[in-house]
Amino acid sequence: MHRTLLFILFGAAAAAATIGADDCNATAISELVEWIDGRDDGIIHQSLQITNGRGLQVKSDAAKPIEKGEVIAQIPWECTINSGKKYSPHKTEMSCGVIYKLAEELSRGDKSRQAPYVRYLLNNLPNGRMPGEWSYEGKQFLSAVLGHGALPPFEHLWKTDYTQNWVEGCAGDEADEIEHAAYFLTQSRHKDNLMVPIYDMIIRTNDVEKVNTIVYKPEVIGDVFRVVASKTIQPGEPVYTSYNIRCNRCNIDHLKTDDSNYDCDLNNLFHTSDIFSQYGIVDNYYPQSWSFDSGDSMDAGEFFSSDRSLQHVSSEFSFCLRQDSNTGELNVYWGAAGNSANDADIAWAGNQLNKLQSLLARKDVLEKKQEIPLMEWESIWKYHSMVSTALDEMIKASMLVSSGGEDQDEL
């Protein structure tokens, strides 16, 4: 599909080039930087280097570091791709409008008002990185690993989301390649309903020691989008942000200090499973934020109390998994009082963990039978390891508390 789109939008010469090759991408990046930096309100820090379109870093030969408070990138409103209609900095969910707008700009190709950004995006399509774009075989196997809806991410968030959200929810054309590309580009790159060049190249991490930027979104239509250094970034050091580190409960109460480094600037409350389903990221980073629903536990659901009124008991439980930087030990932290797992939740988690371990024992046999692309196969087993570890640590921590061994910390 990638080659087809380039042929349609930019002609045979572009399609003949090696898609995603370094020289092709470098040209697109150079044009993009010149386009933004040439605007009156556009800023690209002179010490910034874009590494192959997939990350930013301070130039190794920079005369000095980028200091805390310096603007790394300032993107004018007209360089972003947005719905062109209403805008609110507090709206974080992807809208139909911004997808349609991106599809429109993609279809215009070199005639687009954002042509430099469009060319960059076409050189960096997700190409099956996210589970929603996977092969039929890959989707089916991931569904089996997740117990057909027992474990997150739940299927409506990845397996059927394109049909439900775009085709049905936005009246999109399921057969339109440009709309398909626009949907997954927006899903993987948008920042709260804005497609923002340069920002969308920053490496994501959940390591609080690595995150070195703060994002300031436009307050109203016409404002600029700014990325500012939250601490000194040395020459040769990558630029990092996070999908869920600053405003996630895994970090706020544990790491918040009087220092202004800890500005809570992101409206990101994603769980680890969300980052996998929406962005295809399965790096085994910490802290991790997990939420499970033991919907078949005995204490879940509706029941009649002593006064015969119908009551509901939630079957959801959430926790954070943190790693001690010195010992490597993993620790479970519960989000709030009363949020810890009950006996039925623990039994449910044990049953799910047993199923995952049984599947792992058959991995070699399954590999011979499956016809799944390598990237999908490896991503599935990485996520299998992550969710298995999370369940195992939760069970051990809950059993320790139940036995009176130690109290679990709350966030």
Image (cartoon, rainbow, N blue to C red):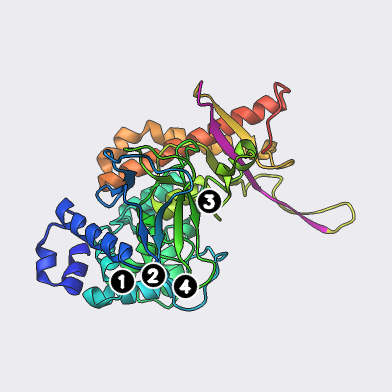
What x and y, as percent, mark residue 393?
56, 30
> What residue is pinned by disc 3?
270
Q: Residue 114 carries which label?
A: 1
Q: Is mark 3 on a helix, strand or loop?
A: loop
Q: Which of marks 2 and 3 is nearer the N terminus?
A: 2
Pick whichever, 31 or 121, lies toward us.
31
Q: Residue 222 carries which label?
A: 4
What x and y, as percent, mark residue 42?
37, 63
> What residue is pinned by disc 2?
81
Q: Are marks 1 and 2 in contact (CB under 8 Å)?
A: yes
Q: Which of marks 3 and 1 is nearer the N terminus?
A: 1
Circle 1: residue type: Gln
Q: Distance between the residues labelled 4 and 1?
A: 15 Å
Pick whichever, 407 or 354, lies toward us.
407
Q: Is residue 291 left or right of residue 222?
A: right
What x and y, as percent, mark residue 384?
43, 39
Q: How far apart are marks 3 and 1 (CA)?
A: 30 Å
Circle 3: residue type: Phe
Name the front one of labels 4 and 1. Answer: 4
Q: Give the range drawn in magenta.
A: 310-326
Q: What element carries label 1?
A: loop
